Amino acid sequence: MKIFGSRFLMVAGLAGAAGLLLNVNCGSSGGGGTGGNGTGGTHTGGTTGTGGTHTGGTTGTGGTHTGGTTGTGGTAGASATGGTAGGSATGGAGGAGGAGGVKATGGAGGNSNTDGGTSTAAFSFTFDKNTEGFIFNNYNPAGGGNVDTTDGGTKPTLTWDNTVGSPSSTPTGSLKLDVTFTDYNQFALISSGTKPWMNGSGKTATVWVLLDAVDGGHTFGGGIQLEASSGTNYTGSNGPYTTLTAGTWKAVTLPLTAAGSFDPAQLIQFSINFTTGSKPDGGTFAGPVHATFHIDTLTDGSGNPGALAPNATFDVNTQGFIASASTHPDGGATPTVTFDSTTGDPTAGSVALTLPFNNYNQGYTIQSDVAPTANLSGKTLHAKVRLDAVDGGTTSFPSGYVQLFVQSAGFKFANGPGKNLTAGTWTDLTLTFSTPTFMVTGYDPTQIIQLGVQFGTGGMPDGGVFGAATSPKFHVDSIVTQ
């Protein structure tokens, strides 16, 4: 049978524009920019434990944490009022307790952003609670064939089903696709974006699909393909054409290897194509055929849990982040965004920025859409930002501030606290999704569609003169949700 190879097209949706970023919180104190260890600073609770001396707790960095050697130091750490820094020593083992204290200066123990920690899947759509952004893709080639866009006939439906799940699904939940085919060369294509870009290099994308019993006794003689798209051009790759047996879950796969312009390190979309295939010689389609499919657990095959979105660690590329100017010099230089493999925090790999300013009240953002739309209520967004030191001196960034921002459905804006930067020093930014520093009416942390970092020169001080135009350089790393 001739395999039907579908095209790859972005699902209609986010425009990617940031909107005008107003009412920013700028010029606030830059304190606490040491990797988020401010809340774990005194670690005063350490002295209440049963771990003996536990003297390092008062250092605020987890320092000596000598109590860990007693074997009961884990309990002491858990009682610390400093928070998660001590909490990482919950294992009770002396060695583990000591490591948790040290992490208070910027690692996972200090509850700040990190590239390390528990291994997570490059991508994971479990469909435990909803459709996770999957909708019908409206691509229709010359000659038609897309049953969702064809005039007349019965439109397919895509819903969430909380009663059915694949063998690997806990809890139960899956996509349910109802579709009627009337001829060969017809297809139903469902897709979801993955933004910021995900890195699936070396992984094998796997999705479980069930063909339910076909109504009317007709046989669905077609098949399905798992597809992935990469980069801004949505360059595609598709897995093998796979046939199904009614009543049996089947794993459908796609090895994520570079081929032509397809780059698995820049995954921007997944699609699943259900097709009747090409007409065989002398064949007659036995239809119409109404088929019901269940789709579950689209993962990278690693078995690891999925990371919270976003998880932009910039290990191999910019993950689709772009620069956008909210207010900038007319006719001025263009901001630049590049990937830097040599610099980062906590590990190498980051986004390098050059942002031109020539006055106060100018600003830029580095941003990405979030797809599928993310419910991040109760979570905290982190980012590491550094103002570079140039030629052995300090780059000028007059009255400069930096802050995280997010936008929810309808591009409803919110931002975290503004911080000042010290050249050569990484600063940890935070934004609590449910209680941001500022938010417009209608902002909804359960429907996040865009996020990024905003840089601005702030308002002109009394009697202030901006001086010569400047193009400071920055690095941004580890834009992650915890």
Image (cartoon, helix red, strand yellow):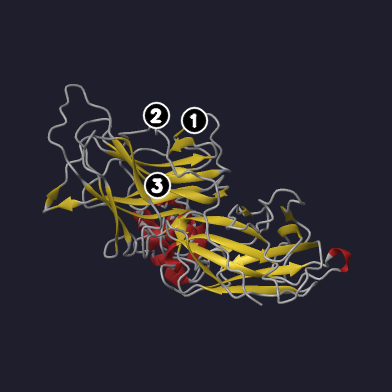
Q: Which amino acid does label 1 sit on?
A: Val
Label 2, secondary structure: give it: loop
Asked if disc 1 and disc 3 are in contact, CB closer than 8 Å, the reply is no
Q: Residue reaching furthest top? A: 462
Q: Sequence order check: which comes first, mark 3 or mark 2?
A: 2
Q: Quadrant of residue 190?
A: bottom right
Q: Sequence order check: which comes first, mark 2 or mark 1?
A: 2
Q: Residue beneath label 2, please?
A: 23
Label 1, secondary structure: give it: loop
User: How far is the residue under mark 1 from the one under mark 3?
Assistant: 19 Å
Residue 256 in percent (x, y) is at: 50, 72
Asked if disc 3 and disc 2 are in contact, CB closer than 8 Å, the reply is no
Residue found at x 44% / y 73%? 259
Q: What residue type is labelled 3?
A: Gln
Residue 219 in percent (x, y) is at: 81, 71
Q: Residue beneath label 3, please?
A: 367
Q: Residues within 10 Å of mark 1 (few under 14, many from 20)?
A: some
Is residue 453 shown left or right of residue 474?
right
Q: Is residue 180 visible?
A: yes
Q: Residue beneath label 1, please?
A: 440
Q: Which amino acid does label 2 sit on?
A: Asn
Residue 241 in percent (x, y) is at: 63, 74
Q: Sequence order check: which comes first, mark 1 or mark 3?
A: 3
Q: In which quarter of the image is the N terminus?
A: bottom right
| Nearest to the observer: residue 142 or residue 422 | 142
